[in-house]
Amino acid sequence: MVIDTKNQHSLPNKTIQSMSRLNNKIMLPLNKIPKQWLNIAPFLPEKPYPCLLPNGMPASPEIMKQIFPTECVKQAMSEDEFIDIPREIREAFALCNRPTPLVRAFRLEKALGLDSDRIKIFYKAEYVSPTGSHKGNTAIAQAYYAKKDKIKGLTTETGAGQWGSALAMAGTMMDLDVKVFQVRASYYDKPGRRVLMNNFGADLVPSPSNQTEVGKVFYKENSNHPGSLGIAISEALELAMKTPDYKYSLGSVLDFVCLHQTVIGLEAKEQMEIAGEYPDVVIGCVGGGSNFSGIAFPFIKDKLLGIKSNTEFIGAEPAACPSITKGKYTWDFGDTAKIAPIAKMFTLGHSFIPPAVHAGGLRYHGAAPILSMLANHDLVSSAMYHQTRAIKAGMLFSRTEGILPAVETCHAIVSAIDKALEAKEEGKKCTILFNFSGHGYFDTHAYKALQENKLVDFEYPNEEIEAALKDLPVVDESKFM
Ligand SMILES: *Cc1c(COP(=O)(O)O)cnc(C)c1O
């Protein structure tokens, strides 16, 4: 492991840019699109755990390569601190508006009555990507590496549609077919996302469908079954495994997905330096954990090396699906039908089906294994929020900063607001950085529900978590650790 010295973190040739309402963003030139991803693995307090097969033994790289692009599997096993980003991927990043701006939320600060010299809120604007979220960062990389494997297409699942749109876009860029199983509830709730995916040429199927064995089980019972992310993952995986020249693509959770998202934090770190700042608190919302990992890992590395030991990291979760806050750190399946590999992570149980009243996104039952390990070591904390508070915070954000946030992003915003108000109360100085993971222009149904007072708050009951956690795989770590 290479130990950085403090000196490498100050850039002697860079002048600090003083920020004002007329100078509220730090933009990086195109040649600052990162040339390497940061691999957090060599810095972790423990070696990352392997993924396991249903028999409880580690999945070999050969098996993983049948499912995922070869290079992604290699990246997940790498112990190098930095991993090169190929030129073609950086070109696609340029098309997708990387480097994304770092913005100081002056008007939000004012609305909260903060003293702008003492409490500062910055956000990283991932919404500027053509499909509106951070998901393109890994979609482009996965499509590029899939094409290098000379396959014809990728299957995937999508809940709200952001991931499906990102992969559909990446598929057109890299000349690959993309087949998307979309959770039926959002297939009907979010017709705009559907049009966007179709426009990119993706083949869309509402899930559960009658095109897979897994889907049929649910479809035959109820052809209008609302579906879940867990079921859609099982369907996409099954189809990829039985279709020649197809592989499977996942938009979150996996180590290599979190790796691909580190472009967010690498850029943000450089931008914060230009602003003459280092965050006291780094915040992101957590579904599977990829956008939070992406912004946090470069700063967590500083914490793990003891360069900045006081930075606080907060994963913001919905009360309806609080994987880290209320889940258990243990081995669990990645999907409902138990086809996906088993991972050690914070989980609510693979049979978790999100409550129908939940509009707030972030519906996956588990959290990324690396992020889970960091949370288990108390290096990362989590907080949960009810959807009404979160979406109200999103409305305040749109009224002050002008952009309508994705409902997922609203959870990061409410968390940032809480942190800022807490610092104000305590009379402390505090610099907050959060990831603005995506815009909400396809999420108008959630804002409409807020405007019509129809949002219902729901906290996932402890008894149901206990019940779902009774069905975990039996794993004997001593057999392989
Ligand atoms: C998918 C998505 C998330 C949640 O996924 P993570 O893997 O936890 O980042 C958050 N925000 C937006 C806008 C998304 O599209």
Image: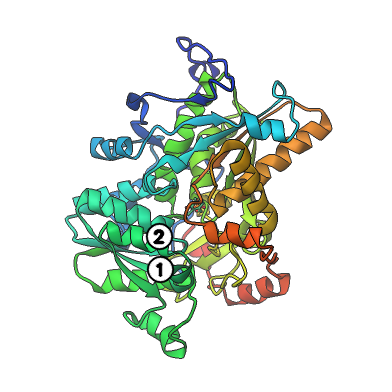
Disc 1 element? strand
Q: Is the residue 121 above or below the residue 259 in the image?
A: above
Q: Is the residue 56 above or below the residue 130 in the image?
A: below
Residue at 48% across / 68% down in the picture?
Answer: 189
In-front residue for pair 170/80: 170
Hey, what amino acid is under mark 2? Arg
Which disc, if any, is residue 193? Answer: 2
Residue 312 left/right relative to 98: right
| Disc 2: CA contacts within 10 A as few (<14), some (14-19) or many (>=20) | many
In-front residue for pair 65/114: 114
Question: Residue 361: image x %, image y %?
Answer: 55, 60
Question: Residue 441: image x %, image y %?
Answer: 48, 51
User: Disc 1 designates what residue?
Assistant: 182
Answer with mark 2 or mark 1, whichever residue precedes in sequence: 1
Disc 2 element? helix
Name the quadrant of the N terminus: top left
Q: Which color scheme did the rendering employ for the protein?
A: rainbow
